[in-house]
Image (spheres, coloured by chain):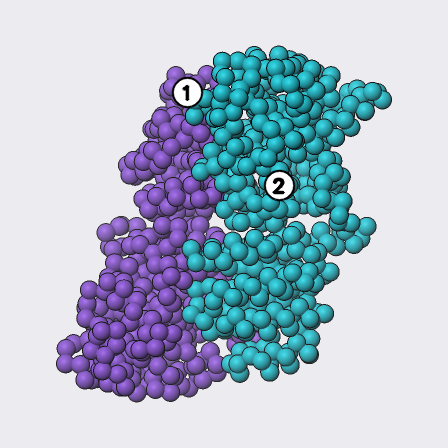
Chain colours: A cyan, B purple
Amino acid sequence: MADEKKTQAGDDMAEKLSRKIKNLDAVFKPSSIAVIGASMEPNKIGHVIVKNFIDGGFAGKLYPINPNASQILGLKAYKSVLDVKEKIDSAVIAIPAAAVAGALEECGKKGIRGVVLITGGFSEVGKVEEEKKIAAIANKYGIALIGPNCMGVITPATRVDSVFLPIYKLGRPRVGKIAFISQSGAVGGCIVDLTARAGIGMSKFVSYGNAAVIDECDLLEYLAHRSVAKKITRKKPVVVIKAGKSAAGAEAAKSHTGSLAGAAEAYHAAFKQGRMIEAETLDELFDFAKIFDQPLPTGKRVGIITNGGGMGVLATDSLEVEKMDLAELSDETNSVLRAALPTYANVRNPLDIIGDADSHRYEIAINAMMRDQNVDVILLIILFQTIAIDSSVVNIAIRASDTRKKPIIAVCTGGEYTDMHKRILEGYGIPTYSSPSSAMRAIAKFAEYAKSRKAK
Amino acid sequence: MADEKKTQAGDDMAEKLSRKIKNLDAVFKPSSIAVIGASMEPNKIGHVIVKNFIDGGFAGKLYPINPNASQILGLKAYKSVLDVKEKIDSAVIAIPAAAVAGALEECGKKGIRGVVLITGGFSEVGKVEEEKKIAAIANKYGIALIGPNCMGVITPATRVDSVFLPIYKLGRPRVGKIAFISQSGAVGGCIVDLTARAGIGMSKFVSYGNAAVIDECDLLEYLAHRSVAKKITRKKPVVVIKAGKSAAGAEAAKSHTGSLAGAAEAYHAAFKQGRMIEAETLDELFDFAKIFDQPLPTGKRVGIITNGGGMGVLATDSLEVEKMDLAELSDETNSVLRAALPTYANVRNPLDIIGDADSHRYEIAINAMMRDQNVDVILLIILFQTIAIDSSVVNIAIRASDTRKKPIIAVCTGGEYTDMHKRILEGYGIPTYSSPSSAMRAIAKFAEYAKSRKAK
């Protein structure tokens, strides 16, 4: 949470604030970018950023800025943004802190509307006045400035990628629907990397660091109003994790607040009031965020399909822990299943279609639960280790999910072979979990959110 | 939990019981194995088992038993175990249920001491009498019988592998110290696969199914007294998960008990009395089990090292949740660190050695905490995404862990590059976690266990 308070509220300022948010367009979808501090040395941040833009296939114009180079990674270099004749939408700045003010002033003069300021050494090391000076310059020109002391921005769709970490160490996610913003660069980087590996899509990633100009509220406002969200009628769900809720954690985060007793409760309350979905752990943040690719459930009755009895039992246990309901299958479903499944399969919920289930048996079970009005959410447990199962079960799940009739959530626990299939499912928007308990926890949050949306 | 009650308790029976447990040696480290139901058809269980023994490099003699084949996968086949002239220690049986009694009787006559009975279709489908008959035959001969309706046994050290799932679908773990026993084949298979993928070692895996003869108590007795455990003076820790604790879950597990209200509490109490470490979820089972490769902590004061500030804050938050203590670094540690770390690093616990930390800086921090008498457990957060970090940090962690002076627990969150390094750490017995919260939860259980051992 940013600590800066907006003390001025005049009309002029309000206009600048809204301009600032509007100018975030230049950060996320620029036609041209300057990298101020572009470097020829491979281990320098300013080198990795230029390389990532080139390797990532950024389609716009790229201008390396370095007073001591004529060319960087095959691109013509400039001494200053003012030396570039063409219009520049946005800049990434990675130069020593002392030089930032001057460079930012030049950005303003050049008409650059968005800046990602990677450079650290401002308020996080006590240099509060220096940071205020930077903020003042950005505000004077209405620049949407991310940072300082941040890790950059990624927009997969536009191939904007100012994160200064090499691609072999930190994977980049495919285009998707989840926007992720993080104060902490470290935590943010982990999430980006996890997301890439899991095959989950991302619309935007922002590490906003010290939030001198653009803070998390500005970003939420921008993300809620100005992107693909317009196409969907419901407001976007926001999943949040607050680090430093405990007293010791807050102390570790060097919070300026004197006493933080009860802070955790204060945050819980604030998030609840803001209708945000609070994650208690990093795992939950990830688990909760990805479920929203599925259509909202209309209730809390879960239908469980499994090819492993023990996993069905664990899922049922966690259903009770999370206060969800075990769907009572309709008579029609029961008779369809009884006719189609082998006699040794016990037709009930959780539906154990037995370890010798093949894809066809999954198809019958999934279709029956999709039709059943008593089932609000389908929890699909697929153990890929069994002999009879093959990859086509993935297509069946995707086909059912694509009807968007009700949410399908998958649990697949295992190693390499399982992970391969999980990535395909995630690639088509079916969230996968490695245990029934983590899936059920996400389902419970999902159902709770859906209910709160209906209540409005 | 097996439901069979031992109603006979005569001396003769007691002797047979102890013989039965002793005969488990034949299951886990046989010199010769018969596969009854060996098949030439690739999709048959009896084929996969023979293939896995061959591919796995089982060094003993292998006898495929099939009345209609002369050769299977290049090995001479026999009509019955009685046709084999040489001694046979152990048999895996995968034939239709109706034929099992006859085959088992032949095993007894042949002097086979251990049997893994894969075949299902007994008490789990209501055929209780048939199962009793099987148990009676096994008990008559003192055969240590695993199953029926089980998924098999793996002993990585002896290359015994009667799990009938193909290796490309279900990975096999390396040799290690954790024994894993599971009633459920499905859950057990998942754990084996997860373990293999994570690079964690396993000493034994047993899916014991219906537990007609050998149940979980027999297995625990065998594992506690008869294996490498002798070398270590303390008793082995047992991590347990009970599926079907909830009423709905128990119903799903088709328990015969009429009312199960409060069953969860009963299990909690029983596990506590048995000094077992209870996992509430599959994730916890895995997280808790692997921490015991590390030396027991002598207290609950945690020293945290991180190259990502946000992760340190999250770790500190979870420390408070799990009621662990933040170690107060000694004056010596503080001065060593202050002299060695860059001026912008804040010397405190959690110790943020900053995003530009290289392996050398980790070495200084780890060594200082290893020496510090105020630190009982080291939580080592390594974010492999950063530019300065390279693979040598892994060697440094392993070298420190190999001194066995105090436990080192790692948190590494990320994608492919991170996973590669996690597997190396796990390979050397350093447990790795993907979030500070899951690591801290395991540390808390670990410290609690260590304390209870000391209290005895």
Q: A211 left or right of B366?
A: right
| Res. A62 mark | none
Q: Nearer the viewer, mark 2 or mark 1?
A: 2
Q: How many C-alpha atoms fall within 10 Å of the one at disc 2: few (<14), some, or many (≥20)?
A: some
Give coordinates of residue B413: x percent, y percent: 48, 41
- The subunit carrying tag 1 is B
Asked if one can make out residue A373 in the rendered structure from this viewpoint, the answer is yes
Give coordinates of residue A172: x percent, y percent: 53, 40
Camera-side residue of A215 and A279 = A215
Pick out the residue farthest to the right.
Answer: A11
| Res. B341 mark | 1
Three-letter amino acid code at disc 2?
Ala
Q: A6 left or right of B241?
A: right
Say above or below: A279 vs B78.
above
Q: Residue at x 40, y 86 (%)?
A: B130
Say above or below: B114 vs B376.
below
Camera-side residue of B343 and B138 = B343
Could you tell me if the residues under marks 2 and 1 are in contact, i.e. CB atoms within 8 Å? no
Q: Residue at x 45, y 22 (%)?
A: A40
**Quarter of the figure with residue A102:** top right
Q: B245 left or right of B289?
A: right
- The subunit carrying tag 2 is A
Say above or below: B133 vs A56.
below
Q: Residue at x 60, y 83 (%)?
A: A339
In the structure shown, which secondary structural element does the residue marked by tag 2 occupy? loop
In space, the residues marked 2 and 1 are separated at their CA atoms by 40 Å
Q: Which residue is mark 2?
A: A157
Q: Residue at x 31, y 44 (%)?
A: B428
Are labels 2 and 1 on one chain? Answer: no
In the structure shown, which secondary structural element does the residue marked by tag 1 occupy? loop
Asked if one can make out residue A406 in the rendered structure from this viewpoint, the answer is no
Three-letter amino acid code at disc 1?
Leu
